[in-house]
Image (tube, coloured by chain):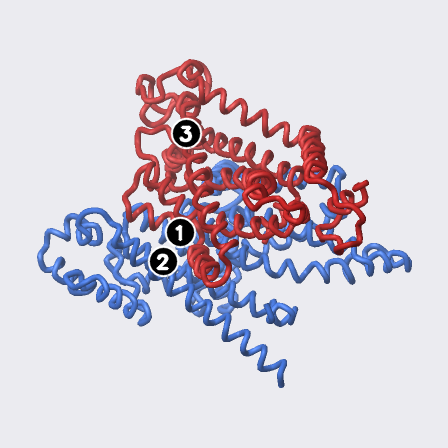
Amino acid sequence: MSVPLLSRLSREGRAPAVGSEPTLPSAEDLRAHLDKQVRIAGRGFWKQPLAVAGVIILGLWLVAGVFAPWIAPYDPLAQDAARFLPPGGDHLMGTDSLGRDVLSRIIHGVRITVPYAVIIVAVSTAIALVVGSIAAYAGGWVDEVLMRITDIFLALPSIVLAMIVAAAIGPGLENAVIAIIIVAWPPMTRIVRSLVLSIRSRDYVTASRLLGASSSRTLVVDFGPNLIGSVVVVAMIEISQRILLLAALSFLGLGAQEPTPEWGRMVSDGAAILDRWWVATFPGLAILTVVLAFNLIGDTLRDTVDPQVSKQVKE
Amino acid sequence: MGVRSSFWLFVIKRLGISVFLLWGVATIMFLAARLVPGDVISVMLGEEAAADPVARQAMIERFGLDRPVPEQYYLHMTNLVQGDFGISMRTRGPVADELARAVPASLELGILAGLISAILGIFLGTLSALQRGKLADQLIRVVTVTGISVPLFWLALVALYVFSFKLQMFPGIGRLSPGVAPPPTATGMYTIDALLAGQLGTFADAFMHLLIPGAVLAVFTMTLITRFTRSAVLEVLNEDYVRTARAKGLTSVRILFAHVLRAAFVPIVTVIGIMFGAVLAGAVLVEEIFNFPGIGQMMFRSAVFLDMPGMIGIGLVVAVIYVGISFVTDILYGVIDPRIRVS
């Protein structure tokens, strides 16, 4: 049977010497083995209290976002109440400088933060998948040129570059999203490139090729699912950092503009009036909890589902 | 002989890479400045000054805006190489002059933030690794996950409100309390200058002004160092020589310092480069809140004013610092671990 090889495959990432095994496992055996590993990892995920907490927090925010018009007690743009009402009574989180209900603005804010962060990560990941795979497969000077370009983008803190690009194309939520995509694709590309390189050298890909699988079959059956799985894990971690960057650009006045109920923007509204602490504190807590939820999920996924990724990400 | 020359070859190669990166950043900046929609001169000068034909003409000549793009690019690059980062439209003064005052202030703050995060991070990371899976490890994990999730600009506001405004434990904003004269300039870092001049009162005041912003800036980097130290220590704990040392009956404290931390130190050094980058990035958001006149505040204000020349000048200086630090850590790493030079 193929058990010795399989157990070794999972323990060490090295190919067995050719001819040392009397029988190679079939591709089906390998898949079954992998599926089992993923299931075990999946069970591990739900046993982590922090990960479950992350899922619950994120779930609550998503529900709040989807049903915002029904959940929010007031219109987020309505300037009906008195200015700077402290929390309590009719306004649980108080009102801001224009008499708008802070809680309602926060609830509507999820509809901006989460979708835009998802767009940022989806687009930058798509770019990274194309560029990173080209670099990994082409190798040679193509790889060299592409990697040097990503190096240049990484020679500045992402917030500084994003600020310059956002200021150049003009402040605004959509432009801030574009600016963040411009700074987000290079690190992602490097991760995708090293993932492709490492998956390509993994045993089951080699094994399936040795078994005579066509290269398109290798790509679809062995390569695709594993690359996508790892990339999803990285993307979860990316989302949290991109939410922070988007909020930071809005805080700086380069992102969302009045009267958009964007959380970073709301914190900056409260920055100049510290004694009216509720104006800045609650939107900041909203950012913290959403980012925390993504980080808790992403971290646990990385540790349980794909330990390979954690190595790549750290590098 | 051979070893020596290979080392210098390594240094020259790394230097070449650094120069290439800075050229690349300067080029991106040039392209970003051309992205500005509408009339570049109005954006650069502000609507008001752009109406003045003399100022317009000066601007056109300075940046060669009437000439073809390749020539503008050449001008942009030669100005930079000569240390001319342009005129800030916010202060109407040269960007380089303001930077000369801002860099020591940020350096002072950055060093303190670095120290706080390194000390706490190495301690928490080691503790976490030694207590792997136990309560302390879990608690530290909660702390680090929260640390990378918290928006620093918000944390700065909360810290300022709680510690300076409510509890009045720390002085408020700025580098010194009102009425305290800055020490005579030697390095531009108030704490060091005050010590050099023997003004202990000024030193204490300047230090107290650094503590809260320094601690806020340290939060993100502390989590990085904690995580990194944890995995570095865990890796070393599994090495044979550590097991041997334990089998020999050495005390765990001795094993920790003589073997584990010594080996884990090398990878930790590499994080320092990343750490300073993160501190710089955080400074952009945090310094303004504490009205601390460093590079971060300059960048913040330039952004608020949409001052492109200012932002580009600061961005380049930040890139020089960033690339310079990674150059130095690479070289240090090459000194510690000669195998690196080959790859």
Q: CA distance from mark 1 to mark 3?
A: 27 Å
Residue drawn 31% across and 34% down? A257
- Any idea which chain is the red one in this picture? A
Residues at marks 3 and 2 on the same chain: no
The residue lying furthest to the bottom in this view is: B1
The residue lying furthest to the left in this view is: B53
Residues at marks 1 and 3 on the same chain: yes
| Direction from residue A213 to residue B93 in the image, left or right | left
Residue drawn 75% across and 53% down? A16
Q: CA distance from mark 3 to mark 2?
A: 31 Å
Question: Decide: marks 1, 2 in contact (CB < 8 A)?
Answer: yes
Q: Nearer the viewer, mark 3 or mark 2?
A: 2
| Direction from residue B188 to residue A257 in the image, left or right | left
Q: CA distance from mark 1 to mark 2?
A: 9 Å
| The quarter of the displayed image where residue A270 is located | top left
Tag 2 residue: B314
- Mark 2 belongs to which amino acid? Ile
Residue B148 visible here: no
- Mark 1 belongs to which amino acid? Val
Query: Which one is nearer the viewer's eye here, B187 or B75?
Result: B75
Q: Which secondary structure, mark 2?
A: helix
Total number of numbered discs in the rendering: 3
